[in-house]
Image (cartoon, coloured by chain):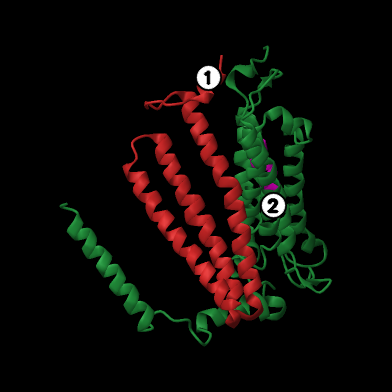
Chain colours: A green, B red
Amino acid sequence: MKRTLPLLLILALVVVFAYLFATKGVISAPTELRPLGKFYLEKCMIGGDFAAGSPEAVTSILWDYRGLDTLFETSVFFLAIIGSLMLFSFKVKEVVREQELTLVVRSVTKIAAVMILAVSASIALHGHLTPGGGFQGGSALAVAPLLVLVAFSRKILETSGLSLKRAIVIRSLGLMGILLTALLPLTLGGYIMQNLPIFPKYIADQLTSGSLIFYNVFEYLAVGAGFTAVFLLISIPEKNFVEEEK
Amino acid sequence: MSTVLFALGSAMILIGGLCDLFGAIGLLRFPNFFLRLHAATVGTIGGAVVPLFGVSLVALGSDFLGSMRYPIAGASAITAIIVLLVAPAGSHILAYAAHKAKLIKWKKVCDHLEAKKP
């Protein structure tokens, strides 16, 4: 009962403030473009070849204006994954049988994994139009194998084509793609990680924002496969590690 | 037509609010994990799926939205279906794990899962 009075007071304050905000027009959408918004729009979308060619300011800054920074950030992430692959370089005993979860969870996982794949691809491919991008899409992509890993077993993931080796190969291909996209302008007489005049802004009348979509797609593959590799490794029970002979 | 849709949708949103309230009260007052899980499920299905369907109905009935009402209605209906699909699986596996770990002390009336095991 001692807490009732303060709680009621807080409730009353919240209601009063909500009413005031809603009716007195304290919060309202601006009708004209602010100088900061104009600046970003010019530098990101409508500034000709000196802009990034994308309406999404965050992706423009990440992969164009401070692209080198993101490139090295990505390499730090991949060094971390290489480190964890090194840590797990044991020989693994063949797992005979693993326990699966109940029928309810398995059925829902089958449906949800496909939907997660679709959503992650959408996040990554629309990274130059809407919030999101390669890293976020890849992180969402890695959830699908993780779910399958938990609900079914490691074995099913490997027999259906996603083995550890393949995940590492996809990761390396993605990383190679990022590097090639970064180095390609050098061979065409541009600067490293140059975006617009080298890469086309529109492909088949669709806004692809030059190199941004390539970076996003490759980063998507690399991050998704990298996380999947780590998940595959940490799902091995400790007792299945065999010590290597000296 | 739009009035009917608006009334139906608003009623569903109201039901959702009530379910959320009851779920919150149950989460605070129920004695053990399984009953609290039941209250949480009332909060997710009754308090999230039903009002989302309501939102999609209200959006369909709002003529002032123009053609923008179809994306709103579709997105909320899809979200509702996904929550309807995924939330029960989550609470199911929580209850299953808690039962399997034998962590919860409760007065049993009927336990088919225990009887099934050797």
Mark carried by residue A201: none
Nearest to the eye among marks 2 and 1: give it.
1
Q: What residue do we see at 54% from left, 35% from top? A: B93
| Residue reaching furthest to the left | A2
Quarter holding the C terminus of chain A is top right
Q: Does dot 2 land on a helix, a strand or a loop?
A: helix
* Above or below, B58 relative to A227: below
Q: List the residue tagged with mark 2.
A: A220
* Above or below, A179 relative to A201: above
The residues tagged by marks 2 and 1 sit, at their Cα atoms, a distance apart of 47 Å
Percent position (x, y) of residue B110?
Answer: 46, 26
- How busy is the neighbourhood of tag 1: few (under 14 within 10 Å), some, or many (20 plus)? few
- Quadrant of res B72: bottom right
Disc 2: which chain?
A: A
Disc 1: which chain?
A: B
Q: Amino acid at mark 1?
A: Ala
Is A89 magenta? The answer is no
Residue A228 visible at all: no
Instruction: Give the left or right position of residue A239, taking residue B98 as reference.
Output: right
